[in-house]
Image (tube, rainbow, N blue to C red):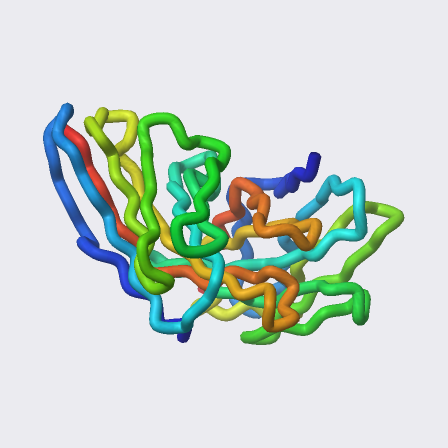
Amino acid sequence: AQSVTQLGSHVSVSEGALVLLRCNYSSSVPPYLFWYVQYPNQGLQLLLKYTSAATLVKGINGFEAEFKKSETSFHLTKPSAHMSDAAEYFCAVSDNTDKLIFGTGTRLQVFP
Amino acid sequence: DAGITQSPRHKVTETGTPVTLRCHQTENHRYMYWYRQDPGHGLRLIHYSYGVKDTDKGEVSDGYSVSRSKTEDFLLTLESATSSQTSVYFCAISDRTSGGAGEQFFGPGTRLTVL
């Protein structure tokens, strides 16, 4: 069975600091991995996806994530946080079936 | 943005009453999903559909039913609402036949409060 673990339900950074949101997955087959962002009172928006084409994936708004099979990780990073990055972030995994399995989310706060 | 609308956007109801939430898409995607979002649980799949009249249960399907009579509409019904069903409900769509990786596109959500 597939699963996703997001370490840290809340992460706080200063504006301009590195953002690192952690995601570890479990999958019995090569996975497809996703990061979604949710701004307050909105639906989820796809940030980026890994589909085995390249291990370093670039997404929207300056975010990127690196697939590391040996560590079963897909951590999300951004070199310099902006106030507008404050949101909740969800990691998700798929084995290319009809369904996604989501992590419990990490709320990112950005302080001036 | 994917053309997904949900109605109503907000609803307050009383315990024991039936409630129907509607998801409407204009993308002609085959797959449609209903999730609920609760603090500390992330998104949990309630039911999903892989075509007209083809539906299946998700992780938290008890107390919910769905119907899909047209490609564009997916209805979620709470037959007799309970306070534990107070949540934010999201609809999502997907079209894996286009060669995608199964990414889903989400509607704006419906905030349901059961008193």
Vertical relation: B15 (above or below) A80 = above
Closer-to-camera residue (B83/B73): B73
The answer to whether one can see residue A109 in this image is no
Nearer-the-camera pick, A11 or B110: B110
Residue A41 left/right relative to A112? left
Residue drawn at x 44%, y 31% as measured from the top left: B60
Instruction: Find residue A34 and report its image quarter.
Output: bottom right
Looking at the image, which is closer to me, A5 or B11?
B11
Residue B37 placement (x, y as % from top left): 39, 42
Relative image position of residue A3 (x, y in whole percent): 66, 38
Q: Where's residue A111, x and y in %?
A: 46, 59
Count all numbered tags in the image, as a single digit: 0
Residue A105 can be seen in this image? yes
In this rendering, the answer to whether A21 lies above or below B56 is: below
Q: Residue at x 45, y 64 (%)?
A: A112
Task: Using the rendered view, name the quadrant where residue A20 is placed.
Answer: bottom right
Residue name at image x 77 percent, y 68 percent? A56
Give the left or right position of residue B111, taking residue A84 as reference: left
| x then y, percent, for residue B53 | 39, 49
Residue furthest out toward the right? A70
* Nearest to the observer: residue B20 or residue A91: B20
Query: Which residue is depicted at the point 74% across and 40% down?
Result: A26
Please tell me in which quadrant of the rendered image residue B27 appears.
Answer: bottom left
Quadrant location, the N terminus of chain A: top right
